Image (spheres, grey):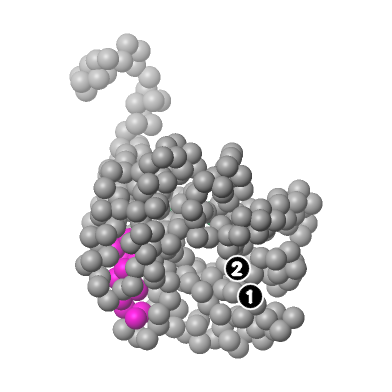
Amino acid sequence: RAKQRGRDTFHFFDPDLDRMLQVRHEQRQRFIDAINHDELRLYFQPQVDMRSGRVVGVEALIRWQHPEQGLLPPGDFLPIIDTSSLEVDLGEWVLTQALEQLTKWQALGIVIPVSVNISPTHLLASGFSQRLAELLERYPQVSPDMLKLEVLESAAMHDVEAALKNIARCQSLGVGFAIDDFGTGFSSLTHLRQLPVNLIKIDQSFVRDMLIDANDMAIVESVIYMANRFERPMLAEGVETLEHAKALMKLGCHLAQGFGIARPMPPEALPEWLASWPKRADWQALAAR
Ligand code: C2E
Ligand code: MG
Ligand code: MG
Ligand code: MG
């Protein structure tokens, strides 16, 4: 059977492996269809400055509006992507959508920076900064500093030289960079020294449990301490309650994102959320503390 399919390099035919490869192939194919059939969506989650109550940006988070399975989070389908070309295609789709959305919001008088998650493979793909420059030129109404890119610490681990070069090139276009999920990598300290990032995002897994887990609290404290020592702005992800917010402010972290502030929402919901946010008295009172 193996030979029939032209895989005569397999000496031992393993039906489980074969089935797995086939399922993967089908999943990947289905995902490519999803891109082409317009089933992907960007949701947006606000980021605020707790000192002023000001909304400082929104993070674009991808969803798959699956016709049978409903709205799927990225954890359900990003693992399907196992070729770099598909990763680059998806990344370019996300960047384009983000710029489209910036344009639409601007037309409504809403000027707000959008952060886009960039996969390590995409960041390190040749011509990344060149393609980004071309994309920005297609949206001349959008100022490049309205676009921020979030990269995982691990993105730089593979090939530090290339990552640094690409990040610097994008920054020279005016695009800001954030390190995402900071603290989950293996060499946080070194990266912080080397990478010219504009924002450090403290990983939500530490923030979420910081009030009940002394180890997580220790990590959050350390990251805030380091970020301050390196004079880098920082943002805490996973801020689920006002208690988290108060504790973070006390430690010296003022930018926040999390379910306590807002869940990721479709773009049409943002204007209404922006109007309601100043009326959230408990959160706005943080500023006065
Ligand atoms: P991330 O970039 O660290 O995004 C933050 C994740 O935490 C989001 O999950 C968000 O919904 C969730 N989150 C935010 N606030 C809270 C909170 O208070 N509590 C909890 N429990 N969770 C919170 P999501 O949307 O499922 O995305 C997961 C990851 O998928 C992202 O983590 C990012 O690494 C990746 N991702 C999302 N969109 C894209 C994309 O367009 N491109 C790429 N390459 N990766 C993406
Ligand atoms: Mg992110
Ligand atoms: Mg994160
Ligand atoms: Mg994450």
Q: x%, y% of residue 160?
A: 44, 40
The yes-or-no answer for disc 1 within 8 Å of ligand 1 is no
Report whether residue 268 is seen: yes
**Location of residue 170 by image quarter:** bottom left
Residue hosting label 1: 50
**Location of residue 217 by image quarter:** bottom right
Q: Residue at x 76, y 60 (%)?
A: 211
Q: Amino acid at mark 1?
A: Met
The magenta stretch is: 95-106
The residue tagged with tag 1: helix, strand or loop?
loop
Residue hosting label 2: 256
Screen quadrant of the C terminus: bottom right
Q: Is residue 229 left or right of residue 18?
A: right
Residues 218 and 212: in front is: 218
Q: Residue 166 — which label?
A: none
Q: How busy is the neighbourhood of tag 1: few (under 14 within 10 Å), some, or many (20 plus)?
A: many
Q: How busy is the neighbourhood of tag 2: few (under 14 within 10 Å), some, or many (20 plus)?
A: many
Q: Is residue 54 left or right of residue 206?
A: left
